[in-house]
Amino acid sequence: MASLREIKSRINSTKKTSQMTKAMQMVSASKSKRAEQNAKGYVPYMEKVQDVVAAIAGGTSDASHPMLISRPVKKTAYLVIGSDRGLAGAYNSSILRQLSRTLKERHRSNDEFVILAIGRVPRDYFVKRGYNVVESIVGLPDQPTFSDVKQIARKAVGMFADGTYDELYMYYNHFVSVISQEVTEKKVLPITDLAPKANEGLSASYEFEPSGEAILEVLLPQYAESLIYGALLDGKASEHAARMTAMKTATDNANELIRDLSLVYNRARQAAITQEITEIIGGAAALE
């Protein structure tokens, strides 16, 4: 059995760990609330842009754009949104595991796809495994603005426009609740989810100046970029929530360990006192 000093040392070190995880939990809780507000506040904008694009695409006969047209797929791009740091439970591993499984199922060779990574963890993961990471961004703030991701968003859209790849998918954690986040795959390009909107009567009689096609030329890249930014906000809300939950679990486990160690310490201390009393009594009896 470990000595009393060793047990006491473990109790003290576990208490310090518990204090750290508790502080990290509180910080993540504050960040999570603000990130959730940012993500939910951005949804109406994305929905409105989608309605406008659907109205133009479905309401004019001359409205066409390469981003709306599916073409033979020779190469696919995957934009994966993760974090720069760990200590967030399964936040990163669930995305990386799902995407890795998808890559093995859909592609026979690494030459058939490219990776765009947001976050140090996914970037390092795919670089280490020899995948073609053509663009990455790290060091994003906890509450990112569009300017923070403008470069990678515009490059992702531009590489589709110039034919570098023929379709773009996003992988990120969708925020469901503080204790639940879902790995989500979303097809960004080509834009194929506008037809249902256009058929819902949103494309009633409109007149466009200049032409619908000229408007789509400007609006569609912005729409695709807004999808990427919206997914990033969603992912950030999930990240902070996952880290808060992970730190709460770590704090609870540390407190449970402290209780168990304290029980072992008290038993060992009691046994030591009992042994000392027995030795004293035995020594006194021997002197009689």
Image (cartoon, rainbow, N blue to C red):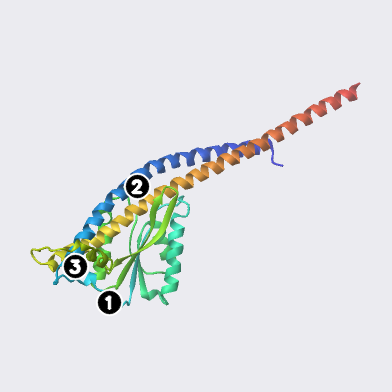
Residue 34 in view in this figure: yes
Indicate the position of residue 203 as horizontal and vertical percent values. 18, 64
Indicate the position of residue 9 as horizontal and vertical percent values. 61, 37
Indicate the position of residue 51 as horizontal and vertical percent values. 22, 59
Mark 1, residue position: 71
From mark 1 to mark 2, how far is it between C-alphas?
36 Å
Dots 1 and 2: beta carbons under 8 Å? Answer: no
Tag 1's secondary structure? loop
Q: Amino acid at mark 3?
A: Gly
Mark 2, other Cα within 10 Å: few <14 / some 14–19 / many ≥20: many
Mark 3, residue position: 58
Q: Residue at x 44, y 54 (%)?
A: 91
Q: Quadrant of residue 268?
A: top right
Tag 3's secondary structure? helix
Q: Residue furthest left?
A: 209
Q: Amino acid at mark 2?
A: Glu
From mark 3 to mark 1, how far is it between C-alphas?
20 Å
Q: Amino acid at mark 1?
A: Arg
Q: Residue at x 40, y 52 (%)?
A: 176
From mark 3 to mark 2, how far is it between C-alphas?
33 Å
Dots 3 and 1: beta carbons under 8 Å? Answer: no
Nearer the observer, 178 or 263: 178
Q: Which mark is residue 36?
A: 2
Dots 3 and 2: beta carbons under 8 Å? Answer: no
**N-terminal label among 3 and 1:** 3
Nearer the observer, 267 or 182: 182
Q: Eyeballing the image, is 279 above or below 209?
A: above
